[in-house]
């Protein structure tokens, strides 16, 4: 499972890369570490509004849910959801059918068991450009969005840096944005994409676990911060 992401690029870079604007541009701020265990927002493109970038609370809750994020997440951790859950839990199944989204990131963090502890890696594109992860979302009673990463079995390239779980995010190619968000795309094709996503070239950088304990300010290059030798 993946509980920490990064989106450490400027707004103008994201808008240029995907050709769509932020709906609320003054809210966005680059973030080295997006920690899913805190109530935090993700930048998302939704089926409802495919031509703008909006925000969603990280952690999927049922459509029109009224209670607090912390109450739900204490009972059911829904930062990540797999295809089995999306097929068998009715309120999640509806999200997969009707409310898919793309989550904008510049990377994500994985963990590898090593010498009785864990090593942490930051996976990102060699170009350091933002990219997209598959997600689903719902609309809460107050009108805010909430969403989750869709995870699938790790391929060999990512599993070399991630063995605490065999589940990793599904990366959506920029060319497949329309496919993923279209209401005309069949559910069978969506499921096939989740089970067999295209190969994506990501670079893995070993970092210090102490990074997560610090209140870091923005920098365009995470690799300058507490990198292990």
Image: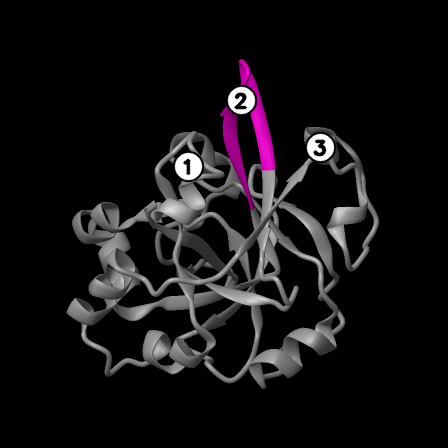
Q: Earlier in the sequence, mark 1 or mark 3?
A: 1
For marks 3 and 2, give the CA distance.
Answer: 13 Å
Task: Let me know if residue 119 is in the magenta part.
Answer: yes
For marks 1 and 3, give the CA distance.
Answer: 26 Å
**Could you tell whether 59 is left or right of 52 in the image?**
left
| Whole-percent x, y for residue 88 in the image | 17, 48
**Could you tell whether 200 is left or right of 154 in the image?**
right
Tag on residue 77?
Answer: 1
Tag on residue 208?
Answer: 3
**Pointer 2: what residue?**
114
Q: Earlier in the sequence, mark 3 or mark 2?
A: 2
Task: Let me know if residue 214 is in the magenta part.
Answer: no
Residue ranking furthest to the top: 116
Q: Secondary structure at mark 3?
A: loop
Which quarter of the rendering shows the N terminus? top left
| Whole-percent x, y for residue 33 in the image | 67, 46
**Could you tell whether 123 is left or right of 175 in the image?**
right
Which residue occupies 74% across, 48% down? 223
Q: Secondary structure at mark 2?
A: strand
For marks 2 and 1, give the CA distance.
Answer: 26 Å
Which quarter of the rendering shows the C terminus? top right
Nearest to the observer: residue 128 or residue 165: 128
Nearest to the observer: residue 168 or residue 97: 168
């Amino acid at each position: 499972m993946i509980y920490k992401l990064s989106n450490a690029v400027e707004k103008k870079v994201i808008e240029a890369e995907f050709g769509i604007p932020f709906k609320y541009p003054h809210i966005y701020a680059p973030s080295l570490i997006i920690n899913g265990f805190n109530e935090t927002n993700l930048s998302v493109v939704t089926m409802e509004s495919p031509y703008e970038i909006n925000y969603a609370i990280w952690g999927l809750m049922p459509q029109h849910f009224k209670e607090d994020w912390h109450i739900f997440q204490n009972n059911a951790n829904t930062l990540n959801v797999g295809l089995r859950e999306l097929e068998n839990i009715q309120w999640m199944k509806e999200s997969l059918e009707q409310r898919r989204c793309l989550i904008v990131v510049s990377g994500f963090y994985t963990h590898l068991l090593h010498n009785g502890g864990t090593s942490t890696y930051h996976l990102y594109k060699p170009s350091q450009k933002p990219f997209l992860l598959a997600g689903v979302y719902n609309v809460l009673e107050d009108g805010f969005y909430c969403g989750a990463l869709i995870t699938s079995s790790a391929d060999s390239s990512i599993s070399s840096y991630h063995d605490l779980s065999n589940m990793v995010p599904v990366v959506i190619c920029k060319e497949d944005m329309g496919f993923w968000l279209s209401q005309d795309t069949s559910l069978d094709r969506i499921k096939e994409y989740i089970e067999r996503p295209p190969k994506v070239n990501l670079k893995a950088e070993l970092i210090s676990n102490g990074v997560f304990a610090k209140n870091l300010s923005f920098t365009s290059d995470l690799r300058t911060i507490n990198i292990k030798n």
